[in-house]
Amino acid sequence: MTSPILQAEDVVVEYHGKGFGAKPFQALHGVSFDLSPGETLGLVGESGSGKTTLGRAVLGLAPVVSGTVRFDGRDITRLPARQRRALGREIQVVFQDPYSSLSPSMTIESILTEPLTAAGVHRRDAQAKVVELLDRVGLPSASRTRLPREFSGGQRQRVAIARALALDPRVIVCDEPVSALDLSTQARVLDLFIEIQERTGVAYLFISHDLSVVRHISHRVAVMYRGEIVEIGDGDQVTSRPTHPYTQRLFLAAPVSDPDEQRKRRMLRRELVNTGDGG
């Protein structure tokens, strides 16, 4: 068995309450998972389920009050700022909005060379790497002289993916990376993620509210509800034959083209909600 590249063990995240005397809000309640090299773990749940908070805990951006996050066996839960920056070579992130995550005043070449030169790569070598990165995500080398606003949403997300790949990371946290894109563009970007993984062996923690998206890309799927993982297992099983009532509700909420099947799903979901199972 391959040792996990990333592990979370009983992670608890708390935020300060708003207002004088307010109690802290616990966003995660002892969450555990593991991620193997070259694997995609899909993290799915509705808004407020804690899935993005878990991704932020991995990135050192959420206040972990107990539990541990380990990368390649090393405890990275509360690293000092300098060590966390150094870890950026190993763990990268792709955010939801491909436009706001790219500086509008910088050319694509500047955006992609910035992490390379910051890591000590000579500028000439960094410029050569940019051409390689653009090719890897299916963009022409001439793109490097353009600004983000000159690209479509799907193309901007390809640039964001290229930036995440610049330092050859071993793990990428993908936080709703296709939710801002139309369906046809979503499919192309998901296929790009899969192609890159097959070529490089990078592991993804893939966060999404959409069960059909995580079904397409994930080897395993973890379902989050109210700050806890309520179901985890093989991607096909969890997204097609879920056992937890909350996951069943997510499955039944997904639209289908057959109106009779859609009507049947709506009735079944209503029954689950009325029983009170899974919230």
Image (tube, rainbow, N blue to C red):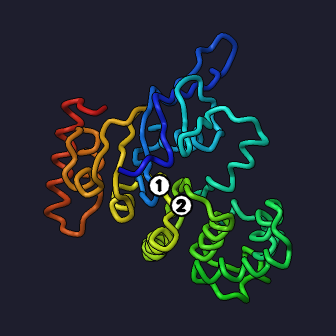
Does the CB distance between marks 2 and 1 fall below 8 Å?
yes
**Amino acid under disc 1:** Phe
In this rendering, the answer to whether 35 lies above or below 68 is below
For mark 2, does the 10 Å Cα neighbourhood hold few (<14), some (14 to 19), or many (20 or more) residues?
many
Q: Name the residue rendered at 42%, 73% in the picture.
A: 187
Which of the 4 image quarters holds residue 70? top right
Q: Residue 264 in the image: state x and y as whole percent.
A: 14, 54
Residue 105 in view in this figure: yes
Q: Residue at x 23, y 31 (%)?
A: 277
Q: Nearer the viewer, mark 2 or mark 1?
A: 1
Place of residue 149 in the rendered image (x, y in percent of width and height, measured from the top left): 72, 75
For label 1, the crowd category at 10 Å Cα-Cα, with few meaning under 14, some 14 to 19 and many 20 or more, is many
Is residue 179 found left or right of 153 in the rendered image? left
175 shown above or below 48: below
**Which element is circle 2 on?**
loop
The tag earlier along the polypeptide, 2 or 1, is 2
Q: State the residue in front, 62 or 8.
A: 8
Q: Is residue 217 left or right of residue 185?
A: left
Residue at the farthest right position: 123
Numbered badge on residue 177: 2
Distance from disc 2 to disc 1, alpha carbons, whole Å, reads 8 Å
Q: Quickly name the residue at label 1.
A: 206
The answer to whether residue 182 is visible is no
Q: Residue 49 falls in which quadrant of the image? A: top left
**Left or right, 100 with reference to 259:** right
Describe the element under mark 1 as helix, strand or loop.
strand
Location of residue 150 (image quadrant) = bottom right
Q: Amino acid at mark 2?
A: Pro
Residue 270 picture location, percent across and down: 21, 42
Quarter that holds the C terminus = top left
Q: Is residue 271 left or right of residue 183?
A: left
Residue positioned 61% across, 60% down in the render: 169
